[in-house]
Image: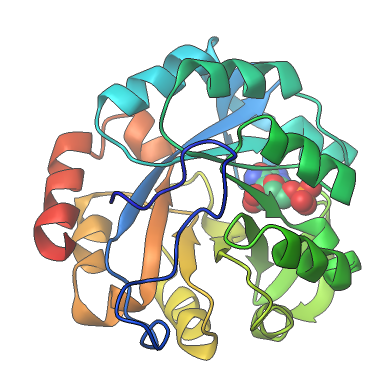
Amino acid sequence: MASLARRATGPAEPPPPGGGGRPKHRVRVMILFPAIDLKDGQCVRLKLGDMAQATVFNTSPAAQAKRFEAQGFEYLHVVDLNGAFAGASINGEAVEAIIDAVEFPVQLGGGIRTMAQVESWLGKGVARVILGTIAVRDPALVRDAARFYPGRIAVGIDARGGKVAVEGWAATSELDVVELARRFEGAGVAAIIHTDIDRDGILSGINWEATLALARAVEIPVIASGGLASMADIKRLTRPDAAVLEGVISGRALYDGRIDSREALALLRGDRG
Ligand code: AMZ
């Protein structure tokens, strides 16, 4: 997909061709985002978001990022886990090493809670930032950021039983997922990344029902996350009703070889490219 952002030089995606705006729920390319979660400078996967249950998959996040790029992925998903708990970027050095090591666009979340942090990361070459906790606490800030940086702000909605969790998932709000998502309609938000916490890192399969319901309820493109387990999930993405999605994030299944990157990318490109 030639329109993906390269570095901090403008909106992540130009308006689609054809004028008149994007036809509702018509996504051209299904993106498979490999995930790098950073804990204490290393590339890890957690189970159910629990920092005590971390498996280290690579001690060099930059080397892992290069590996994903060489495998043909087109967009990298990075989370600063310590940052999500602390409310500020903690693994900044590792993130900068990743950005320096690769050419493909990187989206970054975890601990980005102020406009200054948004600007700083976009200035350093992150293609788009993911805002989670602050989207609940201060939606106006997210709308302002999206207005200043159209196409470069994504909202991370992490759901536990349909309710939105924040602060590294240590706290669950009373807010409903769709209700939160609707606060950003028309604001220029590039994507909503919907993570099902109760599935994350345990290979139990994507929560299709909740993710597709969200995607149908809003105009903002939705990315599925949490639980991607096997090629069956990838195949599920090629079914017509999944065309409302912009993509899917894969962590553990890619690291432990349950999903073969070549096979998965070929399947998605064959069907959607
Ligand atoms: O695994 C976790 N405990 C976790 C996680 N992966 N907690 C937060 N996050 C991710 C969210 C989102 O991408 O999925 O951190 C980001 C949100 O961070 P913040 O600081 O904006 O709430």
Residue 163 on image: x %, y %:
72, 75
Q: Is residue 168 visible in this depiction of the protein?
A: no
**204 vs 238, nearest the viewer:** 238
Relative to residue 74, is residue 221 depicted above or below? below
Q: Quadrant of the C terminus?
A: bottom left
From the viewer's perspective, tell me whether residue 60 is left or right of residue 239: right
Q: Residue at x 43, y 50 (%)?
A: 249
Q: Residue at x 70, y 78 (%)?
A: 184
From the viewer's perspective, tell me whether residue 206 is left or right of residue 267: right
Q: Residue at x 48, y 16 (%)?
A: 101
Relative to residue 73, is residue 154 depicted above or below? below
Q: Quadrant of residue 29?
A: bottom left
Looking at the picture, the colour scheme in use is: rainbow
How many numbered dots are placed on residues in this image? Answer: 0
Relative to residue 227, is residue 164 depicted above or below? below
From the viewer's perspective, tell me whether residue 146 is left or right of residue 212: right
**163 vs 187, nearest the viewer:** 187
Residue 173 on image: x %, y %:
84, 71
Relative to residue 64, is residue 80 depicted above or below? below
Residue 225 on image: x %, y %:
49, 56
Q: Residue at x 88, y 42 (%)?
A: 87
